[in-house]
Amino acid sequence: MARITLRQLLDHAAEHGYGVPAFNINNMEQGLAMVGAAASVDAPVIIQASRGARSYANDIMLAKMIDALVEIYPNVPIVMHQDHGNEESTCLTAIKYGFTSVMMDGSLERDAKTPASYDYNVDITKRVTDMAHMVGASVEGELGVLGSLESGHGEAEDGHGAEGQLSHDQLLTDPDQAVDFVAKTKVDALAIAMGTSHGAYKFSRKPDGAILAMNVIEEIHRKLPNTHLVMHGSSSVPQELQDIFNAAGGEMPQTWGVPVEEIVRGIKHGVRKVNIDTDCRIAMTGAMRQVATKNKSEFDPRKFLKPALDAMQQLCKDRLEQFGAAGHGSKIKVIPMSEMAKQYAKGALDPKIAPARAA
């Protein structure tokens, strides 16, 4: 199985009613964990790299790692996705290195810190979409600013995140504006703001509708039933992972993430891609802390990294099963990017905007 585009995968997910977790990669162990998990349950997988990951691992190393994963696991459909691209060059160089999908996050300006105007977001996202579609690559856009409805602030990750106080309107995607945005930009997927944020410290209590606005997803899906929606910052930060981390000498304050049942609710209302990174990090570092605590004389990195890989693989397997992606990998027939480019050129993949419903 070759790499596939995000659009092809999410079309299949929509047709069959499942969601796909998108896991962030920085190194070999994470890649083996996520694709190994997908292979074990016959699922497709989305591997994504942030700008920080690309700087840490190097584009050439990432490209070669994905080549190796495709060869090791030939039956797993793999999407390679740029997470939170901040400008055209970030997205275009990703495609150059074999990414089949890019996110142009125009909700923030090029500094990846300052909330952008709506017109800026539309303009830059459309330019990236036009260029990416010429070669058959998919594009994810973002409308609204990722951040906490409790604190009114964003949470930076890998140098990407809004700074300063954010208004309630900025933190929630406007459903009517979403219709206009998709129509103008022709994105393949739309990331929305509804109270999730990066990192482990998303909520100070188990989230309810006041701080996790699932109703926004439902309303956008009502207005855009044919658009694939994306939930960012959707690690669940399970209590058991927090306990493992802290029992092995960690000092993670009590925190709450996005409950799996709420993500499943979102999948029933058009969410097809679910970004998960923090859960993977805690699973890995918790396992490494356990090794360090139990055997203080251990110095072989492999003795730390193999348990970490196993812990992350189990986490990824759980999410693939919980989101309904398991069992679908072998059902997907790869469409080459060259063919996707032809379909984009003909307008066959343009967004289907439903007519306005009567009040």
Image: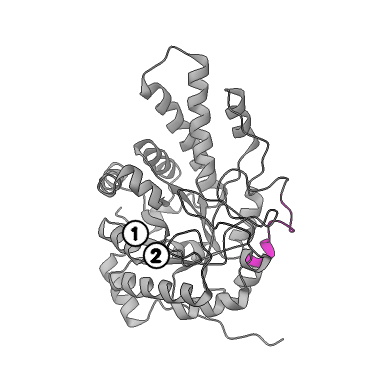
**Residue 313, can we see it?**
yes
Displayed quadrant of residue 100: bottom left
Q: Callout 2 environment at 10 Å: few (<14), some (14 to 19), or many (20+)?
A: some
Residue at left offset 61%, top offset 68%? 173
Magenta stretch holds residue 300: no
Displayed quadrant of residue 171: bottom right
Q: Which residues are magenta?
A: 207-217
Residue at left offset 62%, top offset 44%? 201
Determine contact: label 2, label 1, CB under 8 Å.
yes
For the residue labelled by badge 2, is the local secondary structure a helix, a strand or a loop?
Answer: helix
Where residue 268 appears, x then y in whole percent? Answer: 61, 62
Q: Nearer the viewer, residue 166 or 217?
A: 166
346 versus 165 height, above or below: below
Furthest-bottom residue in this view: 358
Where residue 112 appears, x then y in whole percent? Answer: 46, 59
Residue at left offset 61%, top offset 27%? 246
The amino acid at mark 1 is Ile
